[in-house]
Image (cartoon, helix red, strand yellow):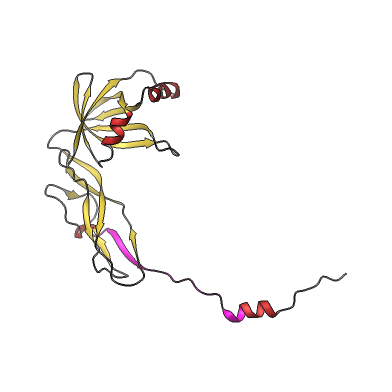
Amino acid sequence: MADVNLSASIRSEFGKGAARRLRREEKIPAVIYGHGEDPVHVALPSYDMMMALKTPNVLIHLDVEGKKQLVIPKAVQREAIRGFLVHADLLIVRKGEKVNVDVPIHVEGELAPGQNLLEHVLNALPVEAEATHIPESVTVSVEGLDAGDSVTAGQIKLPKGTSLAVEEDDVVIQVLAAQAEEPEPEEETEAAEEAPSEVAPE
């Protein structure tokens, strides 16, 4: 699991105007919460946070004006069109404690020959893991799977110390048979071409 170091500053201004000023300073607003502590509103460096988020469930060693906090991102808002960061929610964690997170699913292998389609019922696997040992991803093999086959949560191998946060029989990935397009009936097409067009009476 990757971890990064970031610095943050306490913010006391709120609203759209304050958010715009932060963006001009290449910072984003964020809130830190958890463990019964009062939420703390901070400003984070936009670029550093964007790079940190390239790792799912990244563990962040946060320095808030001298106070050290261990956090993970729980929710991130992005601008709809350009995709830049708008806001982040950061959850305080402790070493050794368990947290519920969604872990990306990495698929490997080739399906059985044929026009089969792979459907991701879940794009990420909900798991419970130690806050300082969250897996970056889990791997699912679809080698040789044919139409009608599926992979359930219980069939996925998890790292030591990680457990499922969903039912074992929940379907994660399934294989579907490709649906062929139905051709138009030839007889109806030919009949339509041969039928005389109606002429409106004068």
Percent coordinates x, y for residue 106 in the rendering: 25, 54
Bounds of the magenta segment: 169-188
Q: In the image, what residue occupies the spot 67% across and 77% down?
A: 193
Q: Above or below — where is 74 with respect to 196?
A: above
Please identify the residue farthest to the right as the structure is shown.
Answer: 202
Q: Residue at x 29, y 60 (%)?
A: 173
Question: Going 48% across and 71% down the picture, which residue do you hit?
Answer: 181
Q: Is 185 on the left or on the right of 179, as rendered?
A: right
In the displayed structure, 2 sits above or below 188; it is above
**97 inside magenta stretch:** no
Q: Position of residue 87 (x, y in %)?
A: 36, 31
Residue toward you, 74 or 54: 54
Q: Nearer the viewer, residue 182 or 194?
A: 194
Locate residue 51, reporting x and y percent. 28, 35
Position of 90 with respect to 25 (left or right) is left
- Up-down relation of residue 78 to residue 111 (above or below): above
Q: Residue 144 appears at what percent x and percent y?
A: 24, 69
Quadrant assignment, res 107: bottom left
Question: Residue at (44%, 24%) from the top-left corner?
Answer: 16
